[in-house]
Amino acid sequence: MQGTTPMFKQYNAIKAEHEDTILFFRMGDFYEMFGEDAETASRVLGLALTARDGGNNVKVPMCGVPFHSSESYVATLVSQGYKVAICEQVEDPKEAKGLVKREVIRIITPGIVLDDQMLAKDNNYIAAVASSGKKTSFAIADASTGAFFALYPTETGKALEELDRYHPVEIVYSEADTVLLAHCQDILGDHGIQYNGHYEHAFHLEDAEAYLKGHFQVNSLEVFGYANPSREGAAIAAAGGLLSYIETMQRSKAANITQFHLTQIDDYMVLDRATRYNLEIERSLAFNDGSPALLDILDETKTAFGRRLLRQWLEHPLTQRSEIENRLAATAEFFHAHQEREALRDQLEHILDMERITSRISYQTANAKDLLSLKQSLMRLPAIKRVVAQLKTPSFQVLDRSFDTLQDLYAFLDRAIAVDAPFSLRDGGLIRDGYNDEVDDLRSMVGDGKNWLTDFLDRERERTNIKNLKVGFNKVFGYYIEITKSQLDKAPADYERKQTLANSERYITPDLKDMEAKMLGASDRLKSLEYDLFVDIRRQLGDHVARILATSRLLALLDVHAGLASCAIRNQYTRPVPIDQGISIRGLRHPMVEQAVGATNYVANDVSFDPVSSRFVLLTGPNMSGKSTYCRSIAIASIMMQIGSFVPAEAAEIAVVDRVFARIGASDQLSKGQSTFMVEMNEVSNILNYATSRSLVVLDEVGRGTSTYDGLSIAYAIVRYMNTRIQAMTIFATHYHELTSLAQDNGIVNRSVAVDDVGSDIVFRHTIKEGPASKSYGIHVAKMAGLPAEIIAMAENALQTLEKEEKANLTAVKDEDISLREQNLQLEQFISLLADWDIEGMSVGDLLNRALALKEEAGRFLQSSDQ
Ligand SMILES: Nc1ncnc2c1ncn2[C@@H]1O[C@H](COP(=O)(O)OP(=O)(O)OP(=O)(O)O)[C@@H](O)[C@H]1O
């Protein structure tokens, strides 16, 4: 509790309702913070901490920021994990009786920010989670673009892993559901995510359903695919809870959220966090030195919303072959139609972030510059529609029919908003001449006043014969006449002295004051009229938010396809053919490594997988020879195809897969406090649980985080299990030469990276060939890395001794050994069943039944041992 003056009483009441925020309390041209808030803000923002009299001789800590530059301060606080409540004066201080009324008009959290300065280029996702029984769902929104959807409830761990793919900046949960909060923190971590509790009732199914129905103005949520409360209830609870949270924080309707749908994990290719990390999908492993990720290479979009859509596609590649083909056809059309593509991209270049401007329109925070940007963007739409009309692909033709060029809104904005309107909404200059008669009249009154002043100045100079007589204006005295000390004797008697300065005197006259009253009255009235008209224009645009967003979505789609086509041309990618099974690629390259080493230096390689004869590729070869690059390039090509992109190859037929897994041994997770080997095994166990025969799995150096025999044995078991039980297309890069003997199993083949021996040195050719590597080149690589000759000699000696004592003969370990152990176990169970049989104590009927059951059991046993 701060201070006891009337102002502090008002402050305390408002702060009590917003305990968990930093309260920005508007006082004149400043937002002031008090007490602990002031101490925190002064520390985080580097502001001077002062104090204000709180009554009864209490000094309350205080600091403040100017309101016109508050955004960057708010952004810093929010980025540091604080919530900021903006408390405004909600009545004109001139009209207030006593203390001016104040209210919190918005609370800003990481997921609620709308200002461009605070937003990253990518989606700014906020999520809400809800559970029902063992199933969990989440809803996701981007308040800055209007995206909104929820996941079909699924097993909690799976749902939260899926949520992780969206990189939410904020997660909202029901205050009462701390168990789910703990699950989230466990799986998604605490860094970079703000967790906020929201009213429990907002997550109750009935309340959430009613909230959504009210928002979308529908009688039933069936239109969004919601039919069964016990199946999809958690999704509705999460969506209702999230919408209620956003609107509570914004203190206004989320009018830009005009669409909603339910998604299923199976709708998209599953790519877990480790896979995205290892394949450098969104961020390169060496991003600090500016190396590009796949997203950076593919991103040739021209608009901010195009880039966001591309990123969404990369996070969620498709799994339906027909949909993939549709996307590829659309990219292909732009690939061939050079003129149309370039004409489109020339126009898109000038289109600003319409999605985010629209969000600011619906939350009534857009300024006149935003509306001018929107107008400038809308101006481009007819030309874009003309390009779309030329396109032949069916999906573009559908798009052409639904393309709304919004020219009525363009005309409206053009008529209403002044071309040079300023940022500030309170200083006039917003409304274009001719839009409103009263504005025009007031403007000419203010203009007349200025002319009058010029005439007045000329008149007074002539009358007094003072050449340097001046007319000036300040806030305290209004308009005044100024005469320097040397000319004072010429001042006429009707001049009334107002102020004495060091070198001059200031005067007023009744005429001047009359004119001043008229001009200031007109100017004040003009400013407030312009503000009101602007708010009304913004509100009128608010009625068209859904239309603007629909057009932005079409533009985003065009932008992504045209960008992918442009990228394919620049990098010589080819259109892949989605097939049902297997992979056959000629001349595959890795898009990022190719850029790093230069296209001419990159050695392209062929890839082939067959579901029967070669579904499991064991890849051997020395370090640095290109194993990882080859493995990853296959996974990347598969993802590229499934988003609708061309692939870096000469020709490619690639099976549509349900999941891609990429594990590179010993990834660095030490910050999580787990050993690298433990992390590796966790990741492998995740793959074994989730991979299917329709998946693509890349395992690179798995098993090397432990002792040689342990690692080799684990790798051996994983290879056999993956090949026989899971049967996913798998490429397993390894240093364990011993594993190459496994190629006698059906489905497993050996491939290796070709190496030229040049005397005692080796040369990497980065070419993949059939068959295993002839030997391990670890010591050669150590030599190339410059290890002292003495160490190399010692190592070669040790290697020879070890090779002689080689005990690991994996060919001797056979599946039969494993199945024999299983059979022995069954036999033991059967015998103990017989031993426990209490024949004397049984009736004849029971005896007969028991004997029949045993016979059946014996039959089953014989059958399984035959297999
Ligand atoms: N096909 C290729 N064409 C040209 N250069 C390549 C090719 N493949 C790999 N390289 C180069 O070789 C380097 C090492 O490749 P990579 O990391 O794939 O080797 P590796 O065999 O997996 O090594 P390690 O076993 O040590 O992880 C790459 O950074 C790249 O510069």
Image: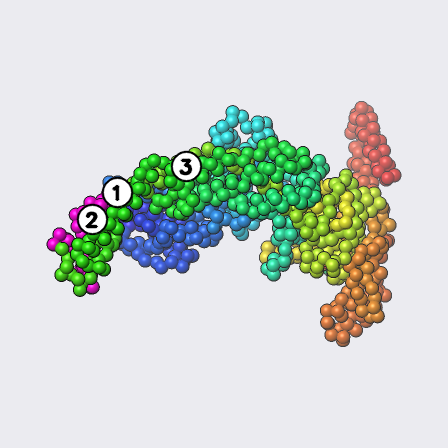
Structural distance between the alpha carbons of marks 1 and 3: 24 Å
Q: Is residue 659 visible?
A: no
Residue at the image position 34 percent from the left and 46 percent from the top: 427
Q: Nearer the viewer, mark 1 or mark 2?
A: 2
**What amino acid does circle 3 point to?**
Ile
Residue 792 shown left or right of residue 414 in the figure: right
Residue drawn where x is 37% and y is 44% of the image:
429
Which residues are the magenta region?
493-519
Position above or below: 629 against 310: below
Residue 631 on the magenta span:
no
Extreme residue toward the bottom, this view: 790
Labelled pair 1, 2 in contact (Cβ < 8 Å): no
Q: Quick check: 543 left or right of 722?
A: left
- Density class for disc 2 (Cα within 10 Å; few <14, some 14-19, many ≥20) is some
Residue that numbered label 1 is attached to: 521
Which x, y percent locates residue 252?
43, 37
- Front-most of residues 862 and 456: 456
- List the residue tagged with mark 2: 512
Please name which of the two marks, 1 or 3, marks the residue nearer to the observer: 1
Q: Residue visible at 85% across and 33% down?
A: 859
- Label 2: which secondary element: helix
Residue 537 is labelled as: 3
